[in-house]
Image: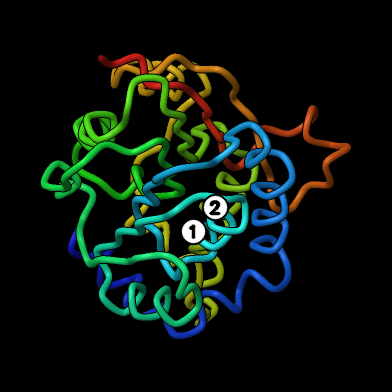
């Protein structure tokens, strides 16, 4: 996990700008247009692994009061500058249990794959949510056509002197759709929807390729 924090520290300065174009812009648009309407955010929400606050800002704009947490102090500084309407703290996912109060919902996007124990982390998030609170997590797909291509291409690129796809060194865990659903259920969530997203393939082809990410949307069944 410390490697992942250091990696994201190095990216913080220009992270939000990356969402202005390309695959990251398409991911942000997908969350805003396809996922956010399912969450209907209001009240107090957590953004666990908030990065530079791009998705925290979307929750705020939708009507939620947001606390964003990230293990990277540099990312938290960027989030505070880019989304002053939300609160942000430096904290790792494993530290969610120390928070007081109960929250009406949470998101944790492209975070669990970096952790030693994703199940424990998701259970810790669930413990901070009210019964019936909504959750959205995004998880990399173990059958992703894009990731397979990246893994095959990376050695060739590095032999040619190019350094790329460094996230593959720290993003270690992958899930099939069934495994993603089981992960959520094991933490006490009723799975409502699983949406696939790919940043490269046109939407019309998503039925023909295995997507890059699963967006799992569910409700907390805890009491």
Crowd rating for badge 1 (residues with CA inside 10 Å; few <14, some 14–19, many 20+): many
Colour convention of the picture: rainbow
Please report contact status of discs 1 and 2: CB closer than 8 Å, yes or no: yes
Residue 88: image x %, image y %? Answer: 32, 66
What secondary structure is marked by label 2?
A: helix
User: Which residue matches tag 1?
Assistant: 56
Q: In the rendered image, which quarter is residue 206 located in? A: top right
Task: Name the residue nearer the viewer: 188 or 103.
Answer: 103
**Nearer the observer, 42 or 57:** 42
Name the one closer to the observer, 221 or 217: 221
Disc 1 is placed on an element classified as: helix
Identity of the residue drawn at 88% across and 37% down: 204
State the image coordinates of residue 103 (x, y, percent, origin top left).
33, 38
Residue 84: % across, % down: 45, 75
Placement of the N terminus among the 4 image quadrants? bottom left
Q: Position of residue 117 (x, y in %)?
A: 20, 36
Would you identify the image quadrant in which residue 175 lies? top left
Left or right: 167 as drawn, with respect to 192: left
On the image, numbered disc 2 is attached to which residue? 59
Using the image, determine if residue 144 lies above or below residue 83: above
Determine which of the numbered discs, if any, sits on residue 216 in the image: none
Identify which residue is drawn at 34% across, 80% down: 77
Specify the quadrant of the image occupied by residue 22: bottom right
Of the 4 image quadrants, the one containing the C terminus is top left
């Amino acid at each position: 996990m410390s490697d992942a924090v250091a990696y994201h520290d190095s990216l913080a300065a220009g992270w939000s700008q990356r969402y202005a174009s390309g695959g990251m812009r398409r991911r942000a648009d997908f969350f805003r247009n396809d996922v956010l309407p399912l969450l209907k955010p209001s009240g107090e929400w957590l953004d666990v692994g908030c990065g530079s606050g791009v998705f925290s800002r979307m929750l705020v704009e939708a009507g939620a009061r947001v606390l964003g947490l990230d293990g990277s102090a540099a990312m938290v500084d960027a989030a505070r500058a880019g989304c002053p309407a939300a609160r942000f703290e430096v904290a790792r996912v494993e530290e969610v249990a120390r928070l007081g109060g109960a929250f009406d919902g949470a998101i944790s996007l492209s975070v669990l794959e970096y952790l030693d124990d994703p199940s424990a982390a998701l259970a810790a998030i669930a413990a901070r949510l009210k019964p019936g609170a909504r959750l959205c997590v995004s998880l990399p797909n173990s059958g992703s056509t894009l990731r397979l291509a990246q893994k095959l291409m990376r050695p060739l690129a590095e032999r040619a002197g190019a350094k790329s796809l460094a996230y593959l060194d720290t993003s270690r865990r992958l899930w099939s759709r069934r495994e993603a659903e089981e992960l959520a259920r094991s933490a006490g969530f009723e799975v409502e929807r699983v949406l696939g997203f790919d940043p490269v393939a046109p939407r019309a082809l998503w039925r023909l390729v295995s997507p890059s990410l699963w967006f799992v949307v569910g409700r907390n069944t805890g009491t």
